Image: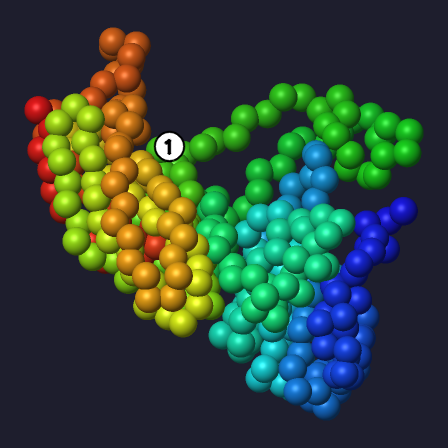
C-alpha cells in the first residue's frame, strides 16, 4: 500500500483534534484553488514533501512546483503553517511569508498523529536540527551536485531511467571544503544560514547563565538553564569548543550536549565532562589523536549560532 494511504493521515488526525471545526482539504495541484480555500479559512496548513531513495541525488528545491503553492497560500492567508516532510534541508523562498514551519522529516505510519499533537500544542517540540539549512545554494561549498558520467547500459529491469551508474566509468568528486563540513563551513566563511545546526524552537523559551569551566586533561563545563516560559519543555543544551590557533581547525566544533527537562520557571545546573577525544586533532606523523596544549574557548547555548555563554580554559 502506498505510504500516502497509510492511516491515520495528518488530515484525519487534525480533524480528530477539532471535531467541531470545519477542516477542509485541497490537494494542492492548483495553487489558485488552494489559495482561494486558504483565503476563506482562519488558518491554512500546507504540507510539502521531497521523496528520496537510494541512488538518487536531491535538489534543495522542492519538486512539482510546491514553492509556488506555498507562496500562493501564504499570500492569501498570513496565518499559514508549513509542514515539511523531507529527509534533509530544503530551500524556503517563502519562509518570511509564513507564520511557522514544522520540519517533520519522514514521519512514518503514526506521523499524522505526531504532527497533530505538535501543531495543537499537546506535545512541546524539543528536536534540534542535525544540519544547517542554507538560505540559497550559493552559500554552500558546492552550488551544484556533481553528476556521474552517463550510464552506458540500460537500467535494471523495473528500474527508472537514470537508476544506478550502469557501466559508467568511476569518477572523482573534489571535496575542496576539507574540514569545513556542515555548520563549520558557515562559521568559517561567515555565512548566515536560514536555520543553524542545532536550531529548534519550542512553545517555551530558555535562558543560559553561570558558565564555569574546569581545565585539565579532562575538562568540564557547568552552567544553568532556566525555563523562562509558561510551558514545560526539554532544551537540548549544546557545548562547542574553539581549539588553539595551532590546531588549524574550523572556528567551533560540537563537543557535548545534554537534554534538560524543565518545568515552567524551573532552573537546573548542568555539568558536562568533555571527552578529550572531542578536543583532539589527528596527528598524521604520529598516526594518532593528539590533544594540543593551549587555550580552548568553550561556548554554550541552544544552537551553533545561539551561544550566549563563553569562557576560556587552558589545557597544559
Residue lying farthest to the top in this orientation: 286
According to the picture, the residue beneath numbered tag 1 turns out to be 178
| Relative to 67, residue 314 above or below | above
Percent from the top left, x then y, of residue 292? 16, 24
Protein image colouring: rainbow
Figure quadrant of the C terminus: top left
| Relative to 161, residue 73 above or below | below
In the picture provided, is 44 more to the left or to the right than 32? Answer: left
Residue drawn where x is 82% and y is 26% of the image: 153
| Relative to 132, residue 263 above or below | below
- Label 1: which secondary element: loop
Residue lying farthest to the bottom in this orientation: 40
Q: How many marks?
A: 1
Residue drawn where x is 70% and y is 83% of the image: 38
Task: From the viewer's side, name the closer residue of 28 and 175.
Answer: 28
Percent from the top left, x then y, of residue 169? 67, 21
In the picture provided, is 278 more to the left or to the right than 22? Answer: left
Is residue 51 at all visible to an observer of this figure? no
Percent from the top left, x then y, of residue 76? 65, 86
Is residue 284 at all visible to an observer of this figure? yes
Residue drawn where x is 90% and y is 34% of the image: 158
Percent from the top left, x then y, of residue 222? 21, 44
Quarter assignment of residue 11: bottom right
Q: Residues within 10 Å of mark 1 (few under 14, many from 20)?
A: few
In the picture provided, is 54 more to the left or to the right than 92? Answer: right
Residue drawn where x is 34% and y is 54% of the image: 302
Amino acid at each position: 500500500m502506498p505510504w500516502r494511504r497509510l492511516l491515520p493521515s495528518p488530515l484525519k488526525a487534525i480533524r480528530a483534534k477539532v471535531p467541531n471545526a470545519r477542516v477542509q482539504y485541497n490537494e494542492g495541484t492548483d495553487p489558485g484553488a488552494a489559495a482561494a480555500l486558504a483565503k476563506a479559512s482562519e488558518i491554512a496548513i500546507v504540507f510539502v514533501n521531497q521523496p528520496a531513495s537510494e541512488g538518487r541525488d536531491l535538489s534543495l528545491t522542492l519538486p512539482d512546483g510546491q514553492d509556488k503553492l506555498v507562496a500562493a497560500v501564504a499570500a492569501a492567508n498570513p496565518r499559514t503553517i508549513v509542514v515539511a516532510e523531507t529527509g534533509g534541508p530544503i530551500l524556503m523562498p517563502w519562509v518570511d511569508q509564513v507564520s511557522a514551519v514544522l520540519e517533520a522529516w519522514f514521519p512514518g505510519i503514526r506521523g499524522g498523529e505526531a504532527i497533530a499533537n505538535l501543531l495543537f500544542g499537546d506535545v512541546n517540540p524539543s528536536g534540534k536540527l542535525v544540519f544547517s539549512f542554507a538560505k540559497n545554494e550559493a552559500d554552500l561549498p558546492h552550488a551544484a551536485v556533481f553528476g556521474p558520467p552517463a550510464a552506458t547500459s540500460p537500467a535494471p529491469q523495473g528500474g527508472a531511467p537514470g537508476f544506478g551508474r550502469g557501466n559508467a566509468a568511476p569518477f572523482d568528486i573534489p571535496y575542496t571544503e576539507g574540514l569545513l563540513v556542515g555548520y563549520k563551513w558557515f562559521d568559517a566563511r561567515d555565512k548566515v544560514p536560514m536555520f543553524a545546526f542545532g536550531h529548534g524552537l519550542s512553545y517555551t523559551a530558555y535562558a543560559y547563565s553561570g558558565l564555569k569551566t574546569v581545565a585539565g586533561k579532562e575538562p568540564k563545563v557547568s552552567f544553568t538553564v532556566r525555563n523562562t516560559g509558561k510551558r514545560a519543555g526539554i532544551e537540548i543544551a549544546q557545548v562547542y569548543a574553539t581549539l588553539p590557533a595551532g590546531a588549524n581547525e574550523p572556528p567551533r566544533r560540537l563537543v557535548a550536549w545534554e537534554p534538560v527537562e524543565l518545568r515552567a520557571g524551573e532552573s537546573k545546573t548542568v555539568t558536562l565532562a568533555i571527552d578529550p577525544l572531542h578536543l583532539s586533532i589527528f596527528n598524521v606523523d604520529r598516526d594518532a589523536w593528539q590533544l594540543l596544549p593551549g587555550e580552548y574557548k568553550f561556548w554554550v547555548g541552544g544552537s551553533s549560532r545561539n551561544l550566549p555563554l563563553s569562557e576560556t580554559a587552558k589545557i597544559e
